[in-house]
Image (cartoon, grey):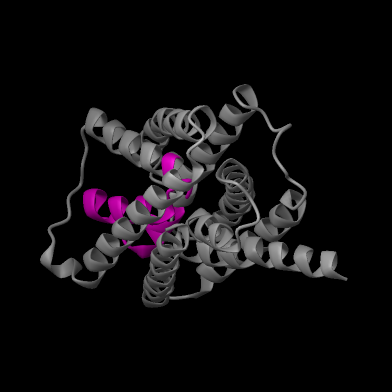
């Protein structure tokens, strides 16, 4: 009975994270990472793989469903960011693996991750709450777009979050995208960044030493959540997308602040 309850919990973590992630362009990793930290059942390396695989499943379904939306992917911008994100993700994952696997300082890195993520989420909330005070841009220089992707990929991989809220904020600030445009383009970027993260693990540390017993249930939750969330995105307004994004980011920020004290 206890095992059934655990399976249901992890399925729901994948489902709810992906449902909200698909609706708000958050990817789901930004929710999964702190929630699994809070649960305390897995080490950071395992959490990274569980998060990446679930988010990859969600983004795959969401992109297929996005064909029903009138909003389309800005192929040039999102492809350049995706390429930069993959490169930055490889560097970020290498830095993460060096500290966690080579130096074996999980607890310290856990604190650093939670602090940085909480601060980033706070800045994102401030930006979207008072966005009328900030000037938005439309970057066209390919090198600048690549560098933006590089920075996003590094932070996303090091923090193990998939990049969702960072992507949405950058797409709004640097490319003047509205809510739904940012969601679809963020999901496109997340798809490639998580795929590269999974390949990197496969060709470096491997999966044999990780406890992935809950992976299938989380992926199932990610697929169903991504399907429902992307379907809802087709029906809801820009205002609702903004509310879902803001509320979710606030809740995750609070969880990360709590996790900092848990580590300490």
Location of residue 74 in the rendering, given as x and y in whole percent from the top left corner:
38, 45
Q: Which residues are magenta?
A: 158-185
Residue drawn 44% across and 73% down?
A: 244
Residue 198 figure quarter: top right
178 in magenta: yes
Q: Is residue 129 magenta?
A: no
| 214 vs 178: above or below | above
The answer to which of 159 and 77 lies nearer the viewer is: 159
Relative to residue 155, is residue 235 depicted above or below? below
Q: Position of residue 66 (x, y in %)?
A: 54, 56
Which residue is situated farthest in the right direction here?
1
Q: Residue at x 37, y 31 (%)?
A: 84
Is 93 or 152 nearer to us in this picture?
93
User: Residue 241: image x %, image y %?
Assistant: 42, 71
Quarter the C terminus occupies = bottom left
Horizontal placement of 18 versus 237: left or right?
right
């Amino acid at each position: 009975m206890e095992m059934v309850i655990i399976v249901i919990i992890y399925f729901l973590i994948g489902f709810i994270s992906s449902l909200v992630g698909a609706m708000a362009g958050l990817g789901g990793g930004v929710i999964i990472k702190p929630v699994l930290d809070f649960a305390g059942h897995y080490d950071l390396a395992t959490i990274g793989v569980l998060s990446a695989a679930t988010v990859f499943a969600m983004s795959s379904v969401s992109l297929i469903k996005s064909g029903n939306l009138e909003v389309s992917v800005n192929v040039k911008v999102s492809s350049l960011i995706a390429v930069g994100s993959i490169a930055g993700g490889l560097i970020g994952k290498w830095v993460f693996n060096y500290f966690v696997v080579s130096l074996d300082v999980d607890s310290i890195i856990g604190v650093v991750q939670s602090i940085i993520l909480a601060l980033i989420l706070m800045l994102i909330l401030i930006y979207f709450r008072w966005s009328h005070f900030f000037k938005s841009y439309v970057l066209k220089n390919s090198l600048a777009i690549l560098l933006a992707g590089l920075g996003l990929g590094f932070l996303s991989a090091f923090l193990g979050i998939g990049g969702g809220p960072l992507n949405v904020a950058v797409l709004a600030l640097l490319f003047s995208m509205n809510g739904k445009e940012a969601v679809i383009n963020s999901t496109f970027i997340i798809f490639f960044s998580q795929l590269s993260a999974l390949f990197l693990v496969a060709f470096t540390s491997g999966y044999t030493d990780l406890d992935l017993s809950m992976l299938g249930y989380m992926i199932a939750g990610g697929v169903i959540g991504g399907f429902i969330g992307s379907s809802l995105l087709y029906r809801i307004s820009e205002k609702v997308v903004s509310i879902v994004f803001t509320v979710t980011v606030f809740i995750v920020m609070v969880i990360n602040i709590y996790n900092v004290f848990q580590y300490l």
